[in-house]
């Protein structure tokens, strides 16, 4: 009887500690963090976020405390968060260090590997007490992702140039999140072996690489973006055959479950280009 009572007491203490650890007021410092919190049913716990956190629609009502150029510490403190979830690449290190020094718990989103999106959903479920909903979302993500990989696994390869940014012109190498998505579509990344993750390149570099497809993400930005007039260089196969693909940057560039919609759209468009080139050979 005494052992049984001790076991009950231990279970009660574990339960109380778990409840105490659950976040009630969260500041989410990246758009994908907001999306993933809503996915696990914890969107109502977000009391502050950053620019461009616009999905789902309810996210637009969350107060903004900064963006890529930095966070406003006074606004963050006024929200009295018990948890800050940050993305190191998207926030200034000095800002995050200040938050930690003030005794506020900071958890970091990795946002590097598409295979670990499900792990992040489970983590957010644990942090907020929404374990069951998070597990369901994680399982659904993994199943859908495996189905997508199987769908495009045996299609012919093409050399692709992903135009991450037009001026200065930038692309991606094999260490990046976007490269992982390109590999799902079964293509060759023209700049996979570049020494820099997000290299600045020239038109001459693209001409030399001779890509068969140019992918242009439709990026939301407040900056004026200068478009590249690719038709000046018809020696590039993608230009010669007008094989340009436009993709949704919000879907592809964010570390959230919606990336599956983005990669499916991109792979389907690439598949159409593969069919076009196969027809040219015949």
Image (cartoon, rainbow, N blue to C red):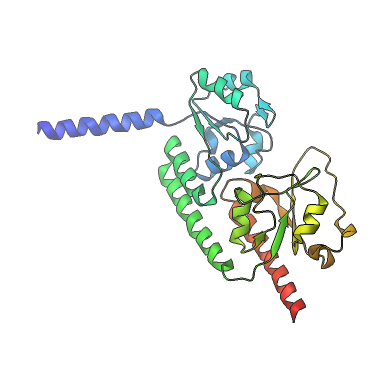
Q: Quadrant of the N terminus?
A: top left
Quadrant housing residue 230: bottom right
Q: Residue at x 57, y 47 (%)?
A: 256
Q: Residue at x 52, y 64 (%)?
A: 147
Looking at the picture, how far across and down is residue 153, in whole percent?
A: 56, 67
What is the residue that sits farthest to the bottom in this orientation? 282
Taking the image as shown, residue 43 lies to the left or right of residue 157, namely left
Looking at the picture, how far across and down is residue 52, in whole percent?
A: 68, 38
Identify which residue, 279 or 207, lies in the foreground: 207
Q: Is residue 204 visible?
A: yes
Q: Is residue 80 visible?
A: no
Looking at the picture, how far across and down is residue 244, in whole percent?
A: 78, 61
Quadrant housing residue 149: bottom right
Q: Does 87 sit above or below residue 252?
A: above
Q: Residue at x 51, y 54 (%)?
A: 141
What is the residue that sits farthest to the left in this orientation? 1
Identify which residue, 84 or 87, lies in the foreground: 87
Identify which residue, 214 or 202, lies in the foreground: 202
Taking the image as shown, residue 175 lies to the left or right of residue 100, namely right
Q: Does 61 sit above or below residue 239?
A: above
Identify which residue, 152 or 19, lies in the foreground: 152
Q: Does 214 sit above or below residue 44?
A: below
Q: Quadrant of the C terminus?
A: bottom right
Looking at the picture, how far across and down is residue 201, in whole percent?
A: 76, 47
The tally of labels here is 0
């Amino acid at each position: 009887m005494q052992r049984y009572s001790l076991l009950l007491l231990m279970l009660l203490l574990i339960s109380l500690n778990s409840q105490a650890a659950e976040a009630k007021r969260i500041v989410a410092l990246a758009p994908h963090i907001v999306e993933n919190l809503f996915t696990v049913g914890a969107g109502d716990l977000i009391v502050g976020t950053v620019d461009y956190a616009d999905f789902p629609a309810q996210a637009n009502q969350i107060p903004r405390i900064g963006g890529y150029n930095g966070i406003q510490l006074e606004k963050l403190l006024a929200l009295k968060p018990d948890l800050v979830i940050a993305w190191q690449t998207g926030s200034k290190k000095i800002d995050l260090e200040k938050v930690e020094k003030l005794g506020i718990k900071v958890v970091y989103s990795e946002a590097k590997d598409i295979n670990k999106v499900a792990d992040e959903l489970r983590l957010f479920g644990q942090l907020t007490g929404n374990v069951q909903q998070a597990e369901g979302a994680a399982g659904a993500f993994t199943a859908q992702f495996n189905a997508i990989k199987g769908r495009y696994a045996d299609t012919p390869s093409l050399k692709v140039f992903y135009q991450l940014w037009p001026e200065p012109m930038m692309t991606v190498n094999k260490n990046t999140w976007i490269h992982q998505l390109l590999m799902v579509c079964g293509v060759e990344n023209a700049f996979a072996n570049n020494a820099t993750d997000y290299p600045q390149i020239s038109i001459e570099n693209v001409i030399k690489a001779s890509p068969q497809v140019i992918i242009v993400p439709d990026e939301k930005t407040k900056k004026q973006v200068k478009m590249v007039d690719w038709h000046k260089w018809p020696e590039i196969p993608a230009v010669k055959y007008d094989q340009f693909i436009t993709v949704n940057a919000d879907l592809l560039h964010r570390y959230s479950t919606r990336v599956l919609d983005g990669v499916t759209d991109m792979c389907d468009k690439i598949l159409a280009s593969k069919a076009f080139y196969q027809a040219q050979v015949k």
